[in-house]
Amino acid sequence: MFAALYAHAYRLRGKLGLTREEALEAWISVLSNGGMIAVAFLSLALALIGHATGSLAVTVSAGYIYSAIGVFEYAIGEYGGRQRKRLAATS
């Protein structure tokens, strides 16, 4: 839900009068929430595959995959930091 809301705000950034910094924050929020969605769907897929194949290891990995959120958030934070520095340098 939040990914859709932030994506909508990002698409309407001109009409909403968002500054470049606000538009960047909206985009970073889209990426962050999209990463959460990706991890959730991956976990769901692993759980379903594990159940269908009878593999306990695959089913259990569905829970451990949530640790990937940290990787996503780190990467998005690095990206956001670089973009904020770039915006500050051009302002």
Image (cartoon, rainbow, N blue to C red):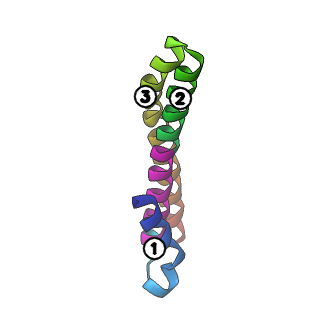
Magenta-drawn stretch contains 33: yes
- Kind of residue indicated by mark 1: Ala
Q: Which residue is mark 2?
A: 48
Quarter of image, res 53: top right
- Neighbours of disc 2 within 10 Å: few (<14), some (14-19), many (20+): some
Residue 79: x and y, percent? 53, 50
Residue at image position (50%, 51%) is 34
Whole-percent x and y of residue 75? 51, 41
The residue closer to the viewer here, 81 or 10, is 10
Q: Residue at x 42, y 67 (%)?
A: 5
Which numbered disc, 1 or 3, marks the residue that appears first in the sequence?
Answer: 1
Q: How many marks are shown on the rendered structure? A: 3
Q: CA distance from mark 1 to mark 2?
A: 34 Å
Question: Magenta part of the protein: which range?
Answer: 22-37
- Which dot marks residue 67? 3
Amino acid type, mark 3: Ser
Q: Position of residue 40 (x, y in %)?
A: 46, 39
- Work out how far the residue at label 1 is from the one at label 3, CA to CA, in angstroms: 29 Å
Horizontal side, residue 2 vs residue 89: left or right: left
Disc assigned to residue 9:
1
Callout 2, which amino acid?
Leu
- SS state under label 3: helix
Going from N to C along the chain, the mark reached first, 3 or 2, is 2
Reply above or below: 42 against 8: above
